[in-house]
Amino acid sequence: MINWDEIRKQFPVTENSTYLNSAAAGPVSRATRAAATEYYDQMMNDADIHWDEWLRKREEVRRNVASFINAEPGEVALTTNTSSGMNVIIDALETHGEVISCDLEFPVSTLPWMNRRIPVHLVKSVNGEVRMDDIRTMMNVRTGVICMSHVQYSNGFRSNLEDLGNLKGGHALVINASQSAGVFEIDVKRMKIDALCATGHKWMLSGYGSGFAYISRELLEKSKPRAIGWLSVEDPYSDRNDEIHLRHDAAARAELGCPHFAGMFALGASADLLNNLSIRNIEERALSLNRFLTNRLNEAGWKVLSPIEG
């Protein structure tokens, strides 16, 4: 049994408030703060002598985040937010066809596609839910991508990712997991997700400037990055200016130039905490608290706008 009171002690915000705004930004733990602070302390006291150590720690974070969603480390890039991850994904799927999304979406799931002149078709929600049959009806020979949030920011509706994966057929399934990563289980292999992005500052509890993206090995092999940096090649320290030999991992596409170490290490500390607690325990706890709050609000006569079953 998890002692949730002890877990709460790792988050000082709980000492003076009942915090209910993690859908905007979640509070960080003492360990997460320490991970980011340690980097800045090292940079302050020693400057750049810890470079190799930082690179090693970055790969530890990548492995931890990959295991969190059942991906290979090479399929995971450490980003700064959802928008940076979504644009890397669109680079890989730019010629894959038109996009199916829905009218509940946060704009980062739609606008970046439109900016590339890729048509986006919005499934109309019914009573706050997006129905699988309506997604199926919108699929045709012109569409090639289904881009949906796992949990909708607008009303909390939660899609069944396994159902979406089984529905997609030849379409690529892209998931915005910003409102679910850290609180609901995600298994990119079992759920047949082709690409996924999330920020770290919400339910991952690692602060602004952290996040990750997943691009499946199959999709990586079929596409090339649009933007690259000096660390995007197989041997960056050869300093070649006359030829390009690109790396074939997600990091090469998103981690352009010198890494944002503080955000990465904060994300890693949070992923450690979440992995140790087990995402299934966290999901069960979150849903239990949600049901308690919803029931009390209903009893008090408040109208709950979120779909109760979703």
Image: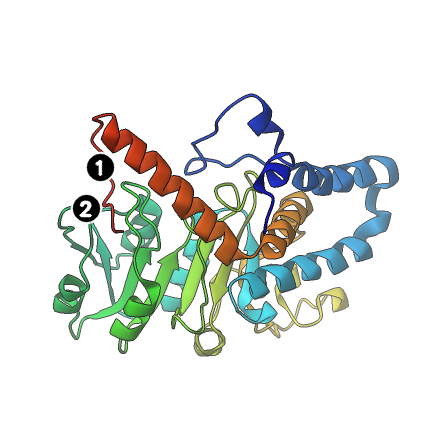
How far apart in space, not on screen, are marks 1 and 2 (Cα)? 8 Å
Residue 155: image tag: none
Q: Position of residue 84 (x, y in %)?
A: 47, 50
Q: Position of residue 39 (x, y in %)?
A: 76, 42
Decide if residue 197 is on the left or right side of residue 231. Answer: left
- On screen, 25 above or below 245? above
Decide if residue 20 is on the left or right side of residue 41. Answer: left
The residue beneath circle 2 is: 128
The residue positioned farthest toward the top in the image shown: 16
- SS state under label 1: loop
Residue depicted at 40% across the width and 70% down the height: 194
Look at the image and tell me whether residue 95 can be seen: no
How many callouts does the rendering have? 2
Residue 305: image tag: 1
Residue depicted at 18% across the width and 71% down the height: 142
Judge by depth and name the residue closer to the eye, 25 or 109: 25
**Which amino acid type corresponds to the residue marked 2 in the rendered image?**
Gly
Q: Position of residue 68 (x, y in %)?
A: 55, 61
- On screen, 88 above or below 203? below
Judge by depth and name the residue closer to the eye, 104 or 51: 104
Look at the image and tell me whether residue 140 can be seen: yes
**Which amino acid type corresponds to the residue marked 1 in the rendered image?**
Leu
